[in-house]
Image (tube, coloured by chain):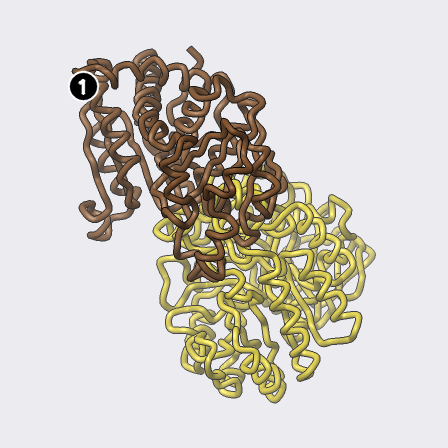
Chain colours: A yellow, B brown
């Protein structure tokens, strides 16, 4: 299946020297030989390697939560051949030295491609712009203060303007802190029952509205991270209708879980933006179907027990996602939200296009980045067996369907179930 | 007897017959508090640990007196004297205390849900003595006992809860408990102090006091935390007192046999005027008195489960 070209057929894929040599649409049973290895994946899906444009690898600075090695091992185990990692490391990725460190470490010990996202503002403080030019040269593909919004509207405007000179995507963490402040979960019936301070949906949607207006004003490329509410969706739908250069993503937990999961006060469900209502979940699915939401990213956010085994209000936000995303994404296909190629595009060609990176899919001559999926494999999610150091997985114990059998990154088999 | 729980965490998950059992037991234990020797040997050899991570005088004292009147040994740990100030996590504190084999933890904590998290991790019984903005079940039970004593029933009564509903665990526990027992709940407060989606609760909402005061059999006045003004939720305490404070003038519109309740501590002159607080309708000190009996009942019922389990 090649979502970029809309191909969904049975065929043979020939890989040689790390490159896709040929796609043979009339499948033949090839004979293995000394120079040819044959892998029979009849009945499975061969797709371009998945791309996750929003993960937290925690290195440098919080290697006890995750490292570039463990995070990318988790990525390939989940079917991802490339990830973009957010800058809220320690130190913050706001200068070329940190970007270079990530790029080097990824080439030394990474299992998949790693695209660093640098900070919008120095130290994520929201005060001064980081040096976009130098960051771009060092290897950054986008800028974001992810984890924190850029509260100062004028600074956000300057970021969108200045990023144009270096063709950098500006990724916004949309949250009006004055509205969300003190909140620990979605504001609604459940938060009131539990007596937990809520974060209203408007805290996200109001900031998206502001940023969309700034994108229109500046013509800068804006990407909205982890969209979670119905109101966000209608603002983005209208913005796209008006031709404003904006794209967006959501994460599997926003189309799979609701705020009711928080009953019981289990901190594994604490995430920012918070899990929303059934109605928001339905709106997210509609937006995935009609193309308002371009991309599915995991927002893989590993934490150690230290950050999670505490009172709900003190626990860290975030859940891991790289190794549980695939079956949840396939659920969208099974539920009939959209056809397989539409959904697969959101985890393959679309994120690459939005990041401004070349993507060839399964085109002969392009680097061999391939994921083999068994769409019917049934398994039980067990975070104890994950490659990630994070165990903060809300899907622990879930029976799911669909699994990556093999992940090939630049011609090298980086993960194989067998 | 209809009580087999390990923990008492909130009113939301209690059944009607469990609530009745607690109230009936409290009623029967009340007599002990009137004796000259106010002590029975029922819980001799049992260990009760008070973990109060938030300031409290009346609830902690009430639980302590209740435990001691049943002859349990009690230990009190407050934030300032605990190892938390040395950096120990709450769960580590619990694990260490657990190793000393207590029978009951009575927990007050500023974080909603903490007693629930602790209850899952200890074999001892856990009583929620107030968690964040979530629940305060023993307060609701003593309120219910007080109403039942004065009105003879809960079923069919109209209870008006006035004030900061959004931040009140007392309001939440009373809403769950009283509606289960057949009472109607009216809530009234400024919109900034009403919680999100209050209309999905089994209550009727009024933004102004005047229309609902005549309907009430019981008026439950909530304490206004003065910092709400600093948070921008109120323009001034003066305006709050004018529109939502219960004073003699507003009370004149109420039913002649209306009960005035307050969980304490009171801000006299803000949510309640001194004449009303000390007036003929007030049952505020009965509430305090009933608190000991209700807490004795809770300890007794939880420990009885332990005995039968052995």
Residue A385 visible in the snapshot: no
Which residue lies at the image location 64% right of the left edge and 75% below the top edge? A222
Q: x, y percentage for residue A233?
A: 70, 61
Q: Is residue B212 above or below residue A251?
A: above
Return the residue nearer the eye: A313 or A417: A313
A188 versus B57 height, above or below: below
Q: Is residue A148 visible?
A: yes
Q: Residues within 10 Å of mark 1 (few under 14, many from 20)?
A: few
Q: Which corner quadrant of the image does residue B221 belong to?
A: top left
Q: Residue at x 33, y 39 (%)?
A: B108
Query: Subunit of mark 1?
Result: B
Question: Which x, y percent locates residue A415?
Answer: 54, 55
Q: Which residue is mark 1?
A: B45
* Residue appearing at x 59%, y 37% in the figure: B201
Is residue B268 left or right of A294 when viewed as pictured?
A: left
Report the front residue among A69 and A336. A336
Q: Is residue A68 left or right of residue A41?
A: left
């Amino acid at each position: 299946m090649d979502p970029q070209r809309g191909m969904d057929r049975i065929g043979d894929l020939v890989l040689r020297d790390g490159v896709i040599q040929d796609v043979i649409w009339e499948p033949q049973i090839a004979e293995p030989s000394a120079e040819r290895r044959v892998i029979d994946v009849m009945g499975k899906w061969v797709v371009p390697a998945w791309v996750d444009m929003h993960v937290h690898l925690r290195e440098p600075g919080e290697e006890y939560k995750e490292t570039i090695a463990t995070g990318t091992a988790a990525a390939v185990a989940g079917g991802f051949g490339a990830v973009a990692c957010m800058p809220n490391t320690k130190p913050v990725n706001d200068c070329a030295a940190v970007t270079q460190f990530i790029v080097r470490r990824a080439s030394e010990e990474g299992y998949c491609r790693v695209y660093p996202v640098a900070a919008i503002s120095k130290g994520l403080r929201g005060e001064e712009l980081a040096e976009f030019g130098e960051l771009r040269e060092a290897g950054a593909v986008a800028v974001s203060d992810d984890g924190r919004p850029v509260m100062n509207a004028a600074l956000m405007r300057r970021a969108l303007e200045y990023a144009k000179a270096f063709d950098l995507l500006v990724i916004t963490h949309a949250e009006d802190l004055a509205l969300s402040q003190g909140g620990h979960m979605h504001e609604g019936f459940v938060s009131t029952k539990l007596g937990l301070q809520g974060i209203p949906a408007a805290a996200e949607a109001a900031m998206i509205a502001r940023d969309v207006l700034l994108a229109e004003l500046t013509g800068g490329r804006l990407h909205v991270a982890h969209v979670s509410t119905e109101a966000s969706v209608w603002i983005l739908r209208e913005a796209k209708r008006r031709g404003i250069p904006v794209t967006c993503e959501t994460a599997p937990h926003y189309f799979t879980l609701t705020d009711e999961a928080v009953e019981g006060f289990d901190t594994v469900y604490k995430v920012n933006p918070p899990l929303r209502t059934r109605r928001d979940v339905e709106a997210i699915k509609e937006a995935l179907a009609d193309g308002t939401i371009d991309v599915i990213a995991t927002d893989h956010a590993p934490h150690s027990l230290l950050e999670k085994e505490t009172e709900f209000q003190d626990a860290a936000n975030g859940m891991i996602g790289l190794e549980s995303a695939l079956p949840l994404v396939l659920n969208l296909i099974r539920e009939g939200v959209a056809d397989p190629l539409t959904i697969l595009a959101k985890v393959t060609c679309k994120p690459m296009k939005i990041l401004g990176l070349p993507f060839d899919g399964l085109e002969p001559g392009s680097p061999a980045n391939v994921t083999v999926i068994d769409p019917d494999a049934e398994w039980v999610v067990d975070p104890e067996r994950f490659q990630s150091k994070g165990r903060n997985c809300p899907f622990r114990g879930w029976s799911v369907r669909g699994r990556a059998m093999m992940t090939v990154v630049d011609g090298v088999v980086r993960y194989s179930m067998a | 007897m209809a009580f087999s729980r390990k923990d008492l965490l909130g009113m939301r998950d209690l059944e009607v017959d469990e609530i009745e059992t607690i109230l009936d037991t409290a009623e029967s234990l009340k007599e002990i508090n009137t004796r000259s020797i106010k002590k029975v040997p029922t819980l001799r050899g049992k260990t009760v640990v008070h973990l109060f991570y938030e300031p409290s005088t009346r609830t902690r004292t009430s639980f302590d007196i209740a435990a001691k009147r049943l002859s349990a040994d009690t230990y009190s740990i407050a934030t300032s004297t605990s190892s938390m100030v040395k950096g120990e996590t709450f769960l580590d504190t619990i694990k260490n205390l657990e190793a000393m084999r207590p029978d009951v933890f009575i927990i007050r904590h500023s974080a909603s849900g903490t007693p629930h998290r602790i209850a899952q991790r200890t074999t001892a019984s856990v009583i929620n003595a107030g968690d964040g903005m979530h629940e305060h079940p023993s307060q609701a039970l003593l309120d219910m006992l007080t109403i039942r004593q004065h009105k003879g029933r809960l079923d069919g009564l109209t209870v008006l809860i006035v004030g900061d509903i959004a931040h009140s665990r007392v309001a939440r526990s009373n809403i769950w408990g009283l509606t289960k027992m057949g009472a109607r709940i009216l809530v009234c407060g400024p919109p900034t102090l009403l919680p999100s989606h209050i209309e999905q609760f089994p209550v009727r909402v009024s933004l102004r006091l005047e229309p609902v005061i005549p309907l009430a059999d019981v008026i439950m006045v909530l304490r206004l935390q003065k910092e709400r003004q600093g948070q921008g939720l109120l323009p001034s305490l003066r305006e709050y007192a004018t529109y939502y404070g219960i004073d003699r003038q507003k009370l004149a519109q109420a039913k002649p046999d209306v009960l005035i309740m307050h969980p304490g501590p009171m801000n006299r002159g803000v949510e309640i005027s001194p004449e009303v607080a000390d007036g003929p309708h007030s049952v505020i000190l009965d509430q305090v008195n009933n608190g000991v009996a209700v807490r004795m009942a809770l300890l007794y019922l939880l420990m009885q489960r332990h005995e039968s389990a052995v």
